[in-house]
Image: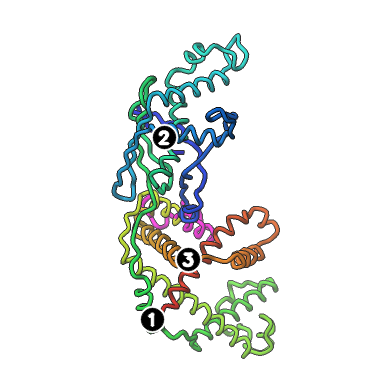
Amino acid sequence: MAEMVFQRNRPLRFFKCNYALSRYKICQSLGIPLIEPLSHDHYPESKIEGKRVSPKTFEKSKILRYHTRMHIEVTKQPKSIVFVKGSLPASDFDGYIGNATRKFVADAELPGFRKGKAPEKMVVEKIGEIAILEEATNDALAKSYPVILKDHNINAIGHPQIRITKLARGNALEFEAEIAVLPEFDLPDYKKLAQGKNTEPKEEITVSDEELQKTLDWLRKSSSFRKRSEDKRSAVETAGNDTELPPLTDEFAQSVGNFKTVDELKNAIRENMKFEKDEKARDKRHADLLDTICSNIAMDLPDVLVAAEKEKMAAELKNGVASMGMAWDAYLAAIKKTEDELKRGWQEDAERRIKSILALKKIAEREHIEPMDDELNAWVYQYLSARTDEEKKDIDQERVKEYAYGVIKNQKVFEFLENITE
C-alpha cells in the first residue's frame, strides 16, 4: 500500500490499482507494481444532462470534470522521479467529504438506532472529523490520481509517496507526490555494436580426451557406488578405489543407457559435453554483447527498481541455498554477512541487470520483435510436460505464459543481433 503522510505523519490507506499492459511485463519481471492510467469503481446509476448513463460513464465524467478544475504542477527530478504538486478546489473536495460522511452514517451502528439510521451529527461526533477527512482524501486521490497519470503521460511504477500539505473542511485539498517512473534513455547504435562483436573470432569448442575420460571415470564410480549400495556394502570404505571400478566394456555401456558399445557411449557423452560448452559460450557472447550495449547507455534508475531487483536476487540466492539443504541463517553465518550487507554489495549487479532488461525491451519494441502464439504454446507445453500432475495443480498457466513471453522475446532479440554481419 502506498503511504500518504499528513503533516502529523499519520498514514492513510491508498487505492487499489490495476495493471497497464504497456508496462506490465517489464514491471512484473522486476517484481514491482505499476499504476493503471484509469481505474473506476461501481457507482449507482446516474444522469448526465438529463440522460441516464452507466455508472462507469458517469463517474468518468465526474472525475474529468473535477480534474479540469484541479491545479497540477509536474516537474522531473533526478533518479527517474516525477514530482507532482496538486490542489483540488474546496467545492469539489466538499463533495467527497459529503460522500464520506454518508458512507460512515450508512455503516454506523449506535445504541438506540438501527444500522444506518443514526443522526449524522452523532455519527460525526463518534468517529471524529479527521476520520471523515481521511476517507474523503482517499476517495478524491483514488479518483484523481489515475487521471493525472494519463493527462501528464506519467509512466508510473510502484506506488507513489504522497504527502497531504493542506487538509481542512471548506478548504482546497493540497498534496505533493513523488512518483517513480520508467527511466528515459536513448539506445546506442546497437546494430553497429553487434556487428563489431560478431566479427570477433569465436573460440573453437572441443571436448578433449582427458575431459571425456574424467566423465567416464565419474560414471563408473557412480555405477560402482550404486551397485555397492544395492548390495548393502559400505560405500565409504570403497569410494575412490579405482581398482574396484567396473571395467569399461560394452556390457557396462549397455548397463548405463541405450548404448550397444563403449564407442556409442563415448560419442554420446562427447556430444552432450560439447552441447553444454556451446550453450555456455553462447550465453557468454550474449552477456558480452549486452554489456557492450549497456555500457553506452546513460540511464538514471529509480531506487524502487534497484531495490526490487535486489529482492529478486536475494530470492534467487535463497532458493539456491535451500536446494543445497542449508538454512538461510546458517548460510549468512558461514559467510559472516547480514542480508542487508549482501544487498548493498549487489548495487552494481542490480543496476546492470535492470539496464539489460530495459535495453532488450526497447530493442524488441524498435525492431517489432514479439513471440508468436505457437512459440508460446510450445514453450508452455514443454514446461508443463516436465511437471507432475500434483505440481500442475499449483501452477498459474497465465503466469507461465507471461514468463515464456519474456524468455522467448529475449532469445529472438539476441538471434536478431547475432545475425547482423554488415
Q: Which residue is mark 3?
A: 368
Residue 175 is tagged as none
Q: CA distance from mark 2 to mark 3?
A: 36 Å
Residue 107 in the figure: left or right of residue 185: right
226 and 147: which is toward the camera: 147
Q: Which residue is mark 1?
A: 422
Other residues around mark 3 within 10 Å, as few (<14) / some (14–19) / many (≥20): few
The mark that comes first in sequence, 3 or 1, is: 3
Q: Tell me the amino acid under the disc marked 2.
A: His
Residue displayed at 58% across by 55% down? 399
Residue 214 in the figure: left or right of residue 230: left
Residue displayed at 32% across by 42% down? 74
Residue 411 in the figure: left or right of residue 161: right
Q: Which residue is mark 2?
A: 67
Colour scheme of the rendered structure: rainbow
Q: Decide whether the magenta segment is chiefly helix, strand or loop.
A: helix
Q: Quadrant of residue 285?
A: bottom left
| Front of the two marks 2 and 3 | 2
